[in-house]
Image: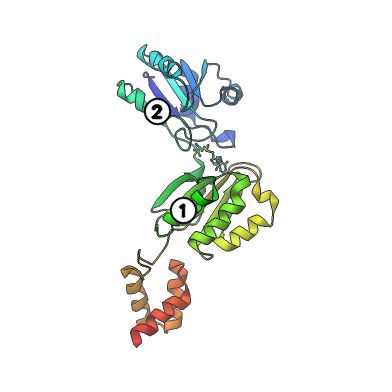
Amino acid sequence: MESGLYVVATPIGNLGDISQRALAVMAAADLVAAEDTRHTSRLLQHFNVDVPLQAYHDHSDARAQARIMACLAANGIVVLVSDAGTPLISDPGYRLVREAQQHGFRVVPIPGACAAIAALSASGLPTDRFLFEGFLPAKAGARAARLQSLSAETATLVFYEAPHRVVETLEAMVEAFGADREALLARELTKTFETLRRAPLAELAAFVAADSNQQRGEIVLAVSGQRGRDQEGELSDETARLLQRLAVELPAKRAAAVVADLTGLRKKALYDYLLGLKD
Ligand code: SAM
């Protein structure tokens, strides 16, 4: 195995999700740089891997980074892991990867679990375009402002959220995106109490608020992007074309219902649009 910095994904719950490449590179490592060495040493023990560990996070001092660079300079194999999932995805490592690249060392991704991608893959929400937003600001005002700035985004939005904030975040999402926008709660992925629930935002917020079990564990929230309308709130050309074409074949009410189903737009607004064309 060639010298380099290997950015290794680890499981997000179910240890069966470790990859063969992850195990091979960890066994060959001269140094494993870990977000939390106690956490990672339990993982390594589970897989009978015995290699030197060093703590590394985004606030590590220059000496920690220098030790890693020295290992790479001596043709070593350094593995970067975070507590769970893919390093750098709402996790430490960005500075280290940049530094390794600047020194001309190889940086090699070893892909695997990532909560955002796992949630999206089973969400039933559009996945052709998505925007990973990570954690929202913890303070209500800043969170509302961020959500507002995303309200016209047409790509599916993906967030990480802490369990003690999930109820208020869902309420803030209803405010910013409207009660009807489709959303997903993906909780405890790959673990015993895995829950995936897709529903309009207001329904999802009520479901989580009513059951304290849904306010526990690790959580991904995803929200469908704004569909069918452009930035000014007008029907997009594509939606208008579809609606008009269907209205040639079907009664206006039926055409509006089909397009509402496809786009998440309100049936009444689509029907009114068709009536307006008649006028
Ligand atoms: N790097 C990780 C990844 O690739 O997903 C994410 C690390 S971030 C510090 C931790 C957050 O990821 C959690 O607060 C939660 O929002 C999400 N997360 C991690 N594991 C999860 C799981 N098993 N189920 C649902 N969400 C999870």
Is residue 253 among the parts visible in the rendering? Answer: yes
User: Is 87 rendered above or below residue 180?
Assistant: above
Return the residue found at the far top.
74
Instruction: Return the residue at label 2.
Output: 95
Is residue 196 among the parts visible in the rendering? Answer: no
The quarter of the displayed image where residue 232 is located: bottom left
- Cα separation, mark 1 vs mark 2, equals 28 Å
Q: What element carries label 1?
A: helix
Q: Is mark 2 on a helix, strand or loop?
A: helix
- Residue at the spot x=60%, y=58% of the render? 205
Horizontal and vertical percent position of residue 17: 54, 35
Horizontal and vertical percent position of residue 146: 45, 51
Mark 2 nearby-residue class (10 Å; few <14, some 14–19, many ≥20): some
Left-right relation of 37 to 260: right
Left-right relation of 3 to 181: left
The quarter of the displayed image where residue 172 is located: bottom right
The quarter of the displayed image where residue 14 is located: top right
Q: Nearer the viewer, residue 247 or 175?
A: 175
Q: Which of 120 and 91 is in front in this view?
A: 91
Q: Is mark 1 within 8 Å of ligand 1?
A: no
User: Is 120 rendered above or below residue 71?
Assistant: below
User: Is 198 rendered above or below residue 275?
Assistant: above
- Residue at the spot x=50%, y=19% of the render? 27
Horizontal and vertical percent position of residue 38: 60, 23
Horizontal and vertical percent position of residue 250: 40, 82
Type of amino acid under label 2: Arg
Instruction: Return the residue at label 1.
Output: 145
